Image (tube, rainbow, N blue to C red):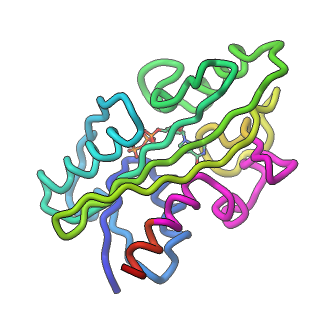
Amino acid sequence: MQELVFATNNAHKLEELRRITGDKFTILSLSDIGCHEDIPETADTLEGNARQKARFVKEKYGYDCFADDTGLMVDALGGAPGIYSARYAGPGHDSRANMALLLANLEGETHRSARFVTCICLIKDGEEHIFEGRVEGEILTAPQGDAGFGYDPVFRPDESDRSFALMSADEKNTISHRGRATAALLDYLLNR
Ligand code: ITT
């Protein structure tokens, strides 16, 4: 079976990817290849950050790999938190604080449309390829459910009347930003 390194420090993303790729690929984690450091993310776009993370692993560890950068874009907040989604409430990755700040900043706002966008950069056989997936929806007024991760409890996709955090992993993956970006990645890898 083909092996691919997923350059992420987010265990939830890794779990989602493994579930989506199923038995088509073996997805190796950063610890599987002996990488235990924080990978810099200093670009000003999702695509730039995805490229930066994948290049870091390729250049330092020598593996063909892919990286995902994801952002939640909220229209009433001018596209925030966007590329700063992981550290919206400050340094670190505290989802509870990030969601609390998002809900506070949207207090009283009726226009709550938003989207998740995932950009995947694949480095394979000396070439870079970009794949994107997005899902439109809205930010709820209070968290619903505790499945998933990150902003899942406060995001309801247009295709459903429930938040991502009230869905099974398979239900979320069928319509999510990451599910769609990964489908494009798999289509490329399996059909090129
Ligand atoms: P890596 O960079 O190591 O891959 P990260 O957690 O820093 O992991 P991102 O830079 O892509 O990931 O940050 C995006 C943040 O957006 C992430 O920390 C979550 O809080 C949130 N997020 C990403 N995907 C999500 C999803 O499917 N559902 C809900 N929130 C998500």
Residue 31 visible within the image: no
* In the depicted structure, whether residue 110 falls above or below residue 8: above
**Quadrant location of the C terminus?**
bottom left
Q: Residue 150's quadrant in the figure?
A: top right
Residue at image point 49% right, 53% down = 132
| Residue 178 located left or right of residue 114 | left
* In the depicted structure, whether residue 3 falls above or below residue 173: below
Residue 54 is situated, as x and y percent measured from the top left of the image, at 27, 51
Residue 141 visible within the image: yes
Residue at image point 77% right, 27% down = 112
| Residue 137 located left or right of residue 89 | right
Residue 116 is situated, as x and y percent measured from the top left of the image, at 60, 42
The residue most toward the front is 192
Residue at image point 53% right, 67% down = 183
Residue 26 is situated, as x and y percent measured from the top left of the image, at 38, 76
Most frequent secondary structure within the magenta stretch = helix
Q: Is residue 182 magenta?
A: yes
Residue nearer the viewer, 97 or 192:
192
* In the depicted structure, whether residue 109 falls above or below residue 132: above
Residue 9 is situated, as x and y percent measured from the top left of the image, at 37, 47
Q: Which residues are magenta?
A: 156-184
Count every numbered label the image shows and give the total.
Answer: 0
Q: Is residue 93 magenta?
A: no
Residue nearer the viewer, 61 or 33:
61
The residue most toward the right is 161
Residue nearer the viewer, 78 or 37:
78
